[in-house]
Image (cartoon, grey):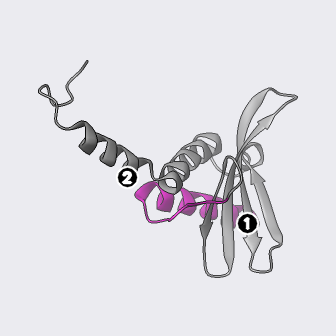
Amino acid sequence: MADQKLSSFVVRLYRKTRSGELQWKQTGARDVFMAQFTKYSVFIHKCFDEDERSEFFKLVIWNEDGEVVEELPSYVLREHVQEADEMLSEMYSTARRVAMGVDKALDALLEDLGKSEEEDVGF
């Protein structure tokens, strides 16, 4: 039962992130972003394993009392969710874009640059 709930949670979080329905925010910590829910918050971290010399991602669920309810690193999620590494990587990238306002920044920069004669076709 817990495995199925875990899988459902990760897949739903991924889909809502991908569709733009979740509002991810900066946390003040480097490489960590959060989405707030009614009684819980979900944080996504980009981590580096010094021993393995590899990058991985981690979801952390916090309750309203500021306690960690669950930590879900991508290497553990692999056992429960197909393509967990890819999903968390994409989720992190999207969360970062949303929290940092990348699209808004690009829109402003494109406006400042004005229209090009070739209208953005090639270099």
Q: In which quarter of the image is the C terminus?
A: top left
Query: Which amino acid type is shown beneath numbered disc 1?
Result: Ile
Q: N-terminal of the two: label 1 or label 2? A: 1
Q: Distance between the residues labelled 1 and 2?
A: 28 Å
Instruction: State yes or no: discs 1 and 2 in contact (Cβ < 8 Å).
Output: no
The residue to which callout 1 is attached is: 61
In front: label 1 or label 2: 2
Magenta span contains residue 23: yes
Question: So how many labels did they put on this image?
Answer: 2
- Of helix, strand and loop, which one carries label 2? helix
Task: Tell whether 104 sits left or right of 26.
Answer: left
* Image location (x, y in percent) of residue 94: 50, 49
**Is residue 19 visible to us here?**
yes
Name the residue located 79 percent from the left edge and 58 percent from the top edge. Answer: 71
The residue to which callout 2 is attached is: 104
Name the residue located 59 percent from the left edge and 42 percent from the top edge. Answer: 89
* Image location (x, y in percent) of residue 55: 72, 34
Magenta span contains residue 24: yes
Query: Which amino acid type is shown beneath numbered disc 2?
Result: Lys
Q: Outermost residue, left direction?
A: 117
